[in-house]
Image (tube, rainbow, N blue to C red):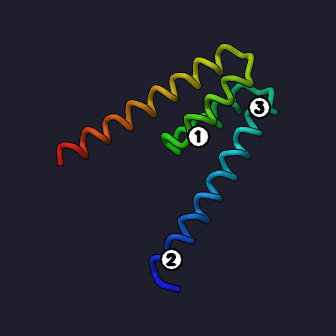
Amino acid sequence: MSFSSSQREMNRDNSLDSEHEISRLVDTAVSCKDIEVKKKVIDVLEVYGEQGITPIQDIIDLNHATEVKLYALDAIKRIKQESASRRLLSALR
C-alpha cells in the first residue's frame, strides 16, 4: 500500500468518524429537552465549519423552541462569514 492510498484511507476513516460524531450530536440535540444542551451541541457543530451547517439546519427543523432556532441561525451565519473570510484570504495570497 503506497503512502497516498494509506493517507486516503485515513482521511476516509476520519470523515466517517466525523459523520458519526455529527449524527450523534444531532440526535442528542433532538432528543434533549434542555435548551442549554441544544445550544452546546450547536456550538460543537459550529466547530465543524461548513460540514456543520446541514446538521444545524436539521436541529432547526426538528426543534420548536424559538430561542434555539435563533441561536442556530446565528451559528450558521458565523460559519458562512468565517468561510467567506477564509476564501477571501486564500484569494489574496
Going from N to C along the chain, the mark reached first, 2 or 1, is: 2
Which numbered disc covers residue 11?
A: none
Disc 2 to disc 1, how far (Cα)?
29 Å
Where does label 2 land, which residue? 5
Residue 47: tell me if it is visible.
Answer: no
Residue 54 in the image: state x and y as whole percent: 59, 35
76 above or below 69?
below
3 or 46, nearer to the observer? 3
- The residue drawn where x is 69% and y is 31% is 38
Direction from residue 25 to residue 81 in the image, left or right? left
Where does label 3 land, which residue? 30
> In terms of secondary structure, where does tag 3 sit?
helix
Residue 28 in the image: state x and y as whole percent: 76, 39
Disc 2 to disc 3, how far (Cα)?
37 Å
> In terms of secondary structure, where does tag 2 sit?
helix
Where does label 1 land, which residue? 45
- The amino acid pointed to by label 3 is Val
Direction from residue 27 to residue 14 in the image, left or right? left
Label 1 neighbour load within 10 Å: few <14, some 14-19, many 20+: many
Q: Quadrant of residue 62?
A: top right
